[in-house]
Image (cartoon, rainbow, N blue to C red):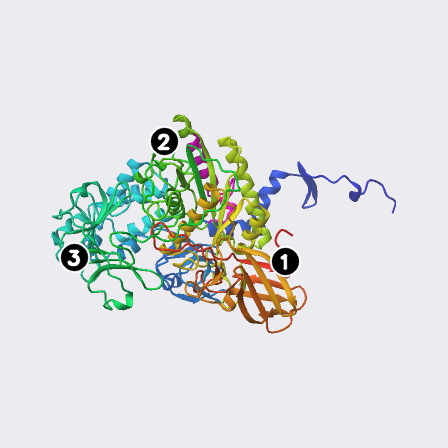
């Protein structure tokens, strides 16, 4: 048959079309694009999929206190979301994957039958405020009254409270919310409010919901006003007992009665420790100085020499060798057994090395932090080192909607219990010299005013925390920079960002090292450009970062899991000397799989402050304990020469449980190579001897592998036992701030910089 026209395959290919040709019942005609879209959405596979998605997203997320309660519930549609409270600490077998999982966490429906919920991760409520949990943790004689007084408010009051918090309300709105709760809220209402607080409230709003609503005031009358039945009390400057411990060591609350016999200077005190006979044992004055009107003894002994139950002591402070550093007896007498008469023993001073980096201290020195939950996590916190340091009136955890800020003394805002708070207190402690060190030669009294701020979002990945991300945390941080510039200019002062701290990585645990490093480097490039544009600073800032140790928790139980995020962070720090691994996280005590406990958070903050002091304030060439050279000497012998801030290196199995071979691993193309011995030679070198010859393409790892299903920290995390001997002591005297070796995996041989 002859070709009578243009073939359709020879026609021009269009990228768009206003309409299409169609055939209907023998009739050929034009089908407009809009008509085709309506037809596709009305019936067929596309319409069915849209209906399925609509059903899945139209149902509210389900909140249940336990997995058992959730398992009894049938989902309303596939894809519906649910959460189980972190108070359910048990575990179960996931009905979809067949793997053991934690009860607490987030779930998604994979069917519509009862119990067809698949565990997603341990996020959600695990990092949120739980009012119910806080109430259950109350103890002492007033606990029952406190729970009873938080009884049953009207639904209208509770709805107003939720709305105030959900929109991050003004102080007036928050006061109304607080009043609603104080006038008695039901458990169901409190549970609903908990979800709103956990998901949306900023730190200032949450602070307004504490128990200072009068619920406890009615029970303080039961406390013995002369403290005769209590062993220990902390009292404020008005003579009000803030914390009291009974003779059994149990905290029983605070009293409002004045105690007699206080030191005449007590009116100037921030707090005081008083003995059972109302005698003042120890005072912390507003200027930071200490007084011991109860006198100091000089007896010397070890813990093993003391009565096993410490029956004669209110409390005892001991060092790692069980040597008593301080004790206070029941009468309020203070003893420093390790000291000379009338003096407090001093630790070795922190090492100060030559300045090799240019530093620029200004009128106001801004230190910014961002990240996920550990950057804003509650915990133990240090007292203010210098009341001349400042904070935003909106608080340490500043957000973009908080615009009416002023600069206030740091001691006037709530002690935001996070890494950045403890970091700046440790930093200033080392700058000033305080009670334990000579003052830095580069510091004059009143110099180097610090402004800290932190802007993290719990459970967020790096993409959502970066510029334009869904959390707005990046924009919150830049708002803090803008506010610092505005307020400094109003006072005729100069300010600049001196450091950026990044506390994150847990939510990206499934990324490869290359994937996470690319995201991290892009985000930091945005920060550098945007901060310089706002402050006008020509000098750059240092980035401090940590390496998580618990990312293996969500992987199959028993599986050997590489810590790819820690590896990415170390590689980024090697490629950019402005990035410093302030610390790995494995030595910090953990409260759960991913979050450090209160003491662990305080330790991380003080380590952070030490690095800020050395690298940012002094300009020392500080680097962590990291490999400089890995050498293969024979088929079975390797040495690793480390960068060591303060020699010698030490294998410490007291503070970190040995995971085997002190955390070192050797691999080749055949798999894991068994290690026969790991030894320290010289002050900066580790020697590894393998039990078999090392094959092709060998790799050396340290703290690199975690075991699937295990949480982080010194007992079960991806970890190692290698540290240096830094003599720096924490600001509260409780910790030695050693530098622990970073997590890494490197080829054998390896030379830093190649």
N-term mark: 2 or 3: 3
Q: Work out whether 637 lies above or below 723.
A: below
Looking at the image, the residue that sits furthest to the right is 2
State the image quarter where residue 424 is shown: top left
Residue 444 - label: none
Q: Work out whether 195 lies above or below 526.
A: below
Residue 750 - label: 1
Q: Which residue is mark 3?
A: 331
Q: Find the distance from the CA under tag 2 to the CA under tag 1.
A: 54 Å
N-term mark: 2 or 1: 2
Towards the viewer: 448 or 32 = 448
Q: Is residue 44 visible?
A: no
Q: Work out whether 652 lies above or below 372.
A: below
> Whole-percent x and y of residue 449?
39, 36
> Whole-percent x and y of residue 344?
29, 52
Towards the viewer: 174 or 276 = 276
> Whole-percent x and y of residue 266?
18, 43
Q: Find the distance from the CA under tag 3 to the CA under tag 1.
A: 62 Å
**Which residue lies at the image location 29% right of the left edge and 54% below the top edge?**
134
Q: Find the distance from the CA under tag 2 to the CA under tag 3.
A: 49 Å
The magenta span reads 460-485
Q: Which residue is mark 2?
A: 404
Look at the image and say whether residue 337 sits in the magenta stretch.
Answer: no
**Which residue lies at the image location 59% right of the left edge and 66% below the top edge?**
666
Look at the image and say whether residue 476 sits in the magenta stretch.
Answer: yes
Contact between marks 2 and 3 (CB within 8 A): the answer is no
From the image, give the main secondary structure of the stretch colored magenta: helix
Contact between marks 3 and 1 (CB within 8 A): the answer is no
State the image quarter where residue 596 is shown: bottom left
In what element is the residue under mark 1? strand
């Amino acid at each position: 048959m002859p070709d009578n026209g243009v073939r359709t395959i020879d026609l021009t290919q269009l990228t768009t079309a206003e309409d299409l040709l169609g055939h209907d019942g023998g009739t050929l005609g034009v089908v407009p694009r809009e008509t085709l879209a309506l037809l596709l959405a009305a019936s067929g596979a596309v319409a069915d999929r849209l209906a399925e998605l609509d059903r899945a997203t139209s149902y509210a997320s389900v909140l249940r206190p336990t997995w058992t309660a959730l398992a009894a519930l049938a989902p309303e549609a596939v894809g519906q979301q649910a959460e189980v409270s972190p108070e359910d600490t048990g575990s179960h077998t996931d009905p979809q994957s067949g793997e053991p999982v934690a009860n607490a966490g987030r779930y998604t429906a994979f069917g519509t039958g009862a119990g067809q919920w698949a565990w997603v991760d341990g996020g959600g409520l695990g990092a949120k405020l739980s009012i119910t949990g806080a109430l259950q943790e109350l103890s002492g004689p007033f606990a029952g009254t406190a729970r009873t007084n938080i009884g049953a408010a009207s639904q209208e009051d509770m709805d107003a409270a939720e709305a105030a918090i959900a929109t991050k309300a003004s102080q007036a709105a928050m006061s109304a919310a607080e009043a609603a709760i104080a006038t008695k809220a039901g458990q169901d209402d409190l549970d609903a409010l908990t979800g709103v607080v956990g998901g949306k409230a900023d730190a200032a709003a949450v602070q307004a919901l504490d128990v200072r609503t009068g619920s406890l005031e009615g029970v303080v009358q039961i406390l013995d006003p002369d403290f005769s039945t209590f062993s220990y009390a902390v009292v404020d400057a008005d003579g009000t007992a803030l914390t009291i411990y009974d003779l059994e060591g149990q905290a029983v609350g605070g009293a409002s009665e004045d105690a007699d016999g206080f030191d005449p200077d007590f009116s100037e005190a921030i707090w005081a420790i008083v003995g059972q006979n109302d005698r003042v044992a120890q005072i912390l004055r507003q200027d930071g100085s200490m007084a011991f009107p109860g006198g100091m003894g000089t007896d010397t002994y070890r813990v093993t020499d003391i009565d096993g139950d410490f029956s004669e002591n209110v409390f005892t402070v001991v060092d790692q060798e069980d040597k008593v550093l301080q004790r206070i007896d029941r009468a309020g007498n203070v003893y420093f057994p390790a000291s000379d008469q009338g003096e407090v023993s001093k630790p070795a001073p922190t090492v100060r090395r030559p300045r090799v980096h240019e530093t620029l201290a200004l009128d106001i020195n801004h230190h910014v932090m961002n990240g996920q939950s550990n950057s804003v996590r509650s915990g133990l916190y240090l007292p203010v080192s210098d009341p001349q340091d400042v904070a935003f009136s909106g608080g340490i955890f500043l957000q973009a909607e908080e615009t009416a800020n002023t600069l206030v003394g740091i001691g006037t805002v709530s002690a935001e219990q996070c890494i950045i708070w403890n970091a700046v207190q440790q930093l200033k402690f080392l700058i000033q010299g305080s009670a334990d060190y000579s003052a830095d030669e580069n510091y004059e009294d009143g110099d180097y005013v610090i402004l800290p701020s932190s802007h993290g979002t719990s459970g967020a990945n790096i993409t959502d925390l970066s510029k334009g991300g869904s959390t707005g945390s990046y924009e919150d941080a830049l708002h803090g920079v803008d506010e610092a510039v505005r307020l400094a200019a109003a006072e005729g002062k100069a300010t600049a960002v001196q450091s950026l701290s990044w506390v994150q990585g847990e939510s990206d645990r499934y990324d490869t090292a290359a994937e996470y490093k690319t995201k991290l480097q892009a985000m930091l490039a945005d920060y550098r450009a945007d901060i310089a544009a706002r402050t006008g600073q020509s000098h750059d800032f240092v980035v401090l970062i940590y390496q998580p140790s618990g990312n293996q928790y969500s992987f199959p139980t028993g599986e050997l899991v590489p810590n790819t995020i820690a590896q990415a962070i170390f590689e980024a720090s090697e490629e950019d000397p402005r990035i410093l691994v302030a610390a790995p996280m494995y030595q910090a005590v953990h409260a759960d799989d991913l979050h450090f406990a209160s003491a662990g958070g305080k330790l991380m903050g003080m380590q952070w402050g030490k690095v800020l002091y050395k690298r940012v304030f002094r300009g020392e060439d500080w680097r962590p304990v990291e490999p400089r050279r890995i050498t293969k000497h024979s088929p079975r012998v390797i040495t690793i020469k480390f960068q060591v801030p303060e020699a010698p290196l030490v294998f410490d199995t007291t503070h970190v449980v040995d995971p085997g071979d002190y955390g070192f691993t050797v691999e080749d193309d055949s798999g894991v190579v068994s290690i026969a011995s790991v030894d320290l030679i010289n002050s900066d070198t580790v020697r590894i001897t393998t039990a078999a010859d090392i094959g092709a393409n060998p790799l050396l790892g340290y703290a690199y592998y975690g075991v699937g299903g295990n949480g982080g920290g010194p007992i079960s995390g991806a970890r190692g036992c290698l540290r240096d001997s830094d003599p720096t002591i924490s600001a509260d005297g409780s910790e030695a701030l050693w530098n622990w070796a970073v997590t890494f995996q490197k080829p054998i041989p390896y030379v830093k910089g190649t």
